[in-house]
Image (cartoon, rainbow, N blue to C red):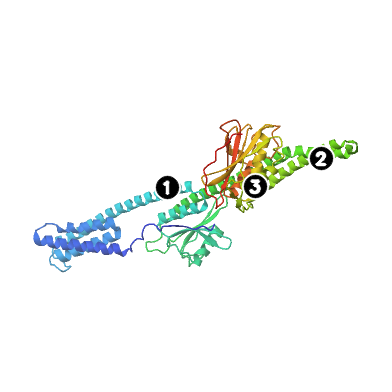
Amino acid sequence: MTSLYVVPSGRPPRPPFWVGYGLSLLLVAAATLAAIIVAQLVTVPNLSLVFVLPVVIAAVTFGWGPALAAAVAGVLAYNYFLLPPLYTLRVNDPANVWALVLLLIAAAIVSAVAAQSRRRAMEAVAAAEQAGAFQTLARDLVGAADRTRIVGAGVEALGRLFQAPAVILAPGPDDMTLAAETRHAVLSDADREAARWALASRLPTRGGAYPVEDAAFDFWPVITPQRAQLVIGLAISGRDEGRPEAPERQVETVAGYLSVALDREEYARQLLEGRVQKASEQLKTNLLAAVSHDLKTPLSTILFTLQSLKKFGPRQKSADREELLALAETETARLAGMVANLLDMNRLEAGVVVARPTPTAPADLVAEAVRRAAPALADHRLANEVKPAAAPLLVDGPLFESALANVLENAGKYSPKGAPVAVRAGTEDGMGWIEVVDEGPGFSGPAEPLFEKFTRGVAGDGRPAGAGLGLAIAKGFLEAQGGRIEAGAREDRPGAYVRLIAPLAAETAPKAAQPTASV
């Protein structure tokens, strides 16, 4: 796992603890000034209540410690500035002593109650944030489709829960690999050593403690049932605000979420591999079925011919021998064509087909393709309507000729004996095309599935010979040189058309589409 997922570091760090004490004393100073001003303007029987206000504010805002400091400072300020004798801490009237004691007790009680309310409110907010973090983590993991996103969602949840730098590491070939981190998370060599130790021992480690005292991060190992391994790291030890109480509960919850998500991803990968293997086995089965079914006839014919010539050759008439030899030659050519198709499909699937486009006249492409498909077109009337002056195409000649020959062979196989087959050429939308039309049965459904491997237009015994690769090879060869192939049913009469579309040569200006003539 080498991908790195970086997430923001969360809220800004908390201010130092002494800030609360300093602000609490400033509140007491403000209350003292207000009390002095009020005492000079009007006679108020009990100004000590003014000093309860900063205590409450400090307790709600900063907690118990600053509130208690505000209570003590308030009592001292009240005695020094407002009780006679002024500007001294001596108290002459015993009643004022009781007033100061009651003020301190009341302030302490109020601060305790306010601090308790603040603590509960903060716990409620923390619980809400924790629930929100886990909810977000669960939602993100549901949509995470790979390990990078899974560990990214996990480290984001950790950073949000603890407001501290967080990392997730995974074992690599040589060392622990950083898989995800929050910003400002910096790992030292000691931290990586501690992570390795945690994963090897299956035990958590603590920053600044045994077994690696120089490590700044706490680490927890994560081992899923499917043996996926991760290490969670948090920089929560040695901070000014102290280490969180029982962080293991939140870490273990996040680790549980990550374990489920990682195993789910592993199961999905295994399922995909199983489907690929099943598809591969099905492909082999289809290939074996196609080869065994379609190669049986030509091989049997060739074997029968050779056996007949060997056994009865001297007694056969010359015309009979010539007929047998012609039959063997035809079946051999047919067999060679099937093997060539299988080899071409293997080249396409291996990605080794390299196109070298050059300007080529459509008439030359059609002439060579017709010659190669001559055996399949022997019983048909071919109408070659491609003019010598047709706009040249920018194609790889041999590849395009192979594609066109496969289309012509298909037309010859599936058209009734004696039916015409026409070849046309034209341009449209800046592209050139060569089209083969026939008067066969056409397509019983959508034409797109026929461009898949081992797919034929007619099923059942007695179907035309072939492995069902012709249109698939034609499509692959056209796409390899920047073209495409289209097919559909004819509109004017029963039959089908297959159009091979390729770029025009650079020197050729786009022409309007040529009208389609009927066969």
Q: Is residue 292 left or right of residue 241?
A: right
The numbered mark at residue 325 is: 2
Q: Which residue is tagged 1?
A: 135
Seen from the viewer's position, the closer of residues 512 and 63 is: 512
Real-space CA distance between mark 2 and mark 3, rounded to the nearest whole angstrom: 31 Å
Q: Secondary structure at mark 2?
A: helix
Look at label 1 and name its amino acid. Answer: Gln
Look at 59% across and 47% down and name the residue there.
479
Locate residue 136, reporting x and y percent. 42, 48
> Which label sits in the foreground, 1 or 3?
3
Q: Earlier in the sequence, mark 1 or mark 3?
A: 1
Real-space CA distance between mark 1 and mark 3, rounded to the nearest whole angstrom: 67 Å
Locate residue 453, reporting x and y percent. 64, 42
Q: Are marks 2 and 3 in contact (CB under 8 Å)?
A: no
Q: Secondary structure at mark 1?
A: helix
Q: Secondary structure at mark 3?
A: helix
Q: Would residue 147 be visible to someone looking at this image?
A: yes
Look at label 2 and name its amino acid. Answer: Leu
Locate residue 331, reporting x and y percent. 76, 40
Q: Are marks 1 and 3 in contact (CB under 8 Å)?
A: no
Real-space CA distance between mark 1 and mark 2, rounded to the nearest whole angstrom: 79 Å
Question: Which residue is outermost to the bottom?
Answer: 88
Quarter the C terminus occupies:
top right
Q: Is residue 324 left or right of residue 141?
A: right
